[in-house]
Image (cartoon, helix red, strand yellow):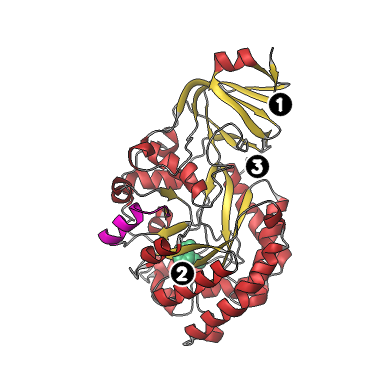
Amino acid sequence: MMIKADLLIHSAAQVVTCASIMPKRGEAMQDVGMIADGAVVVKDGRILSIGPTESIRQQYSAPQTIDASGKVICPGFVDPHTHVVYAGERIGEFEQRIRGATYLEIMAAGGGIVSTMRATRQASVVELVEATLPRLAQMLRLGTTTVEVKTGYGLDLDSELKMLQAIAALDLAQPIDLVPTFMPAHAVPPEFNGRSDAYVEWVTNEMIPAAADWYRSSHFAEAGRPFFCDVFCEQNAFDLAQSRRVLEAGLVHGLLPKIHADEFTPLGGVGLAVELGATSVDHLDVTTPEDVAKLADSDVVGIVLPAVNFNLGSHEFADARALIDAGAAIALSTDINPGSAPCPSQPLVMAIATRYQQLLPAEAMNAATINAAFGVGLADTVGSLDPGKQADLLLLNCTDYRQLAYQFGGNLVDGVVKNGRLLPLVTNI
Ligand code: NIG
Ligand code: FE
């Protein structure tokens, strides 16, 4: 008896599952779970079965079939750290940096995050949605099917809530699943200049409770999608004690901790992340060997963002090789934002990670899929091709998945299946 499904994709040169019930670590990072001449069966938007084409075709039939000969099938990418919702661009700062100014100098002079804050405060929810939709369309075209999105360009109560509303509207308006993160402690806003403790008090006493209220009545809570709280633990942003206050207040209200740590200055954010049981600790550019060991010993996912270093023209990258070798669960992310990483592409991030962080293509693949899903608390539904998970998968125009990291500057994504549906994709990017 043939089992009836909705969609059967067969004859793929490789099916790469990235399957794992735990974040991949160490040697397991080199295993992408490959099936040669593979097939994937989809029913009700979920993966029903995966296996060699011959055995799958003997067991399943479907009204829609796709011949994937000459192609690779892999999970849709999960981008676990983004600031994709914003108004305005910062091309002037890009030129300032080319002329020699540093990111931190521009930030200290009132540019950087605060300049995007000014534009974002002026934008309406609709304007924020309209500015962000093309960026998400581009990410989808490049294979990303789940995206974490942070607030943090509002930096006052109304503007931060406006960003949350934009994230909710965007989640409903386009195919990528969004995961909201509240990040009012992204920078100290100008009205609190020199009074960062007072701002932190406002964040913990007023903003976080208001965000928790928003979440409770949002469709995200109903869908069981998590809600995170993040803080920029950095010189001229928030010190370790302030970061702790923010994340602990988040926890009290049900927001799960994430932290920007060790991007430019090692302030001890890894220890805080481990102590609080954070879902992820992100950046890790200047993490000390002691903190590498601490992270490796924990369940916290380390998210590295090499498009930032690349964009800032740096020759120094997070030592993701050492982190993986120490046993840490490492994920990759674009960090797409108008300042430190105007980059929508997980494949480009993989290309950078393989060259400057000595990740193997297999490690980069797992880091952009299953480990990234763990980094946003969604590994039970996305990040790998596993029966029961959402059918979010890519058809790649190549016969070896390693091409994804080997090539750069183009786009190998030939088709995106989201929740079991083959999407029509914008091609003019
Ligand atoms: O992750 N580090 C802080 N936040 C972002 C940069 C945001 C911006 O420059 O607008 C980051 O790099
Ligand atoms: Fe960031």
Question: Which mark's residue is nearer the viewer, 2 or 3?
Answer: 2
Mark 2 or 3 closer to N-term?
2
Viewed as shown, does residue 63 lie left or right of 309? right
Closer to the camera in the image, 52 or 88: 52
Q: What residue did someone put label 1 on? A: 6
Q: Which mark is residue 426?
A: 3
Per the rendered image, the range of residues in magenta is: 288-300
Question: Which mark's residue is nearer the viewer, 3 or 1?
Answer: 1
- Callout 1 amino acid: Asp
Q: What type of secondary structure mainly makes up the magenta span?
A: helix
Q: Residue at 69% across / 18% down in the picture?
A: 3
- Callout 3 amino acid: Val
Q: What residue did someone put label 2 on? A: 232
Closer to the camera in the image, 202 or 265: 202
Q: Is residue 341 above or below residue 242?
A: above
The reply to whether the C-beta atoms of the residues labelled 3 and 1 are less than 8 Å apart is no
- Tell me the distance, in whole angstroms, between the alpha carbons under discs 2 and 3: 34 Å
Q: Residue 129 location in percent, x, y?
A: 69, 60
Say if residue 361 shows up in the picture: no
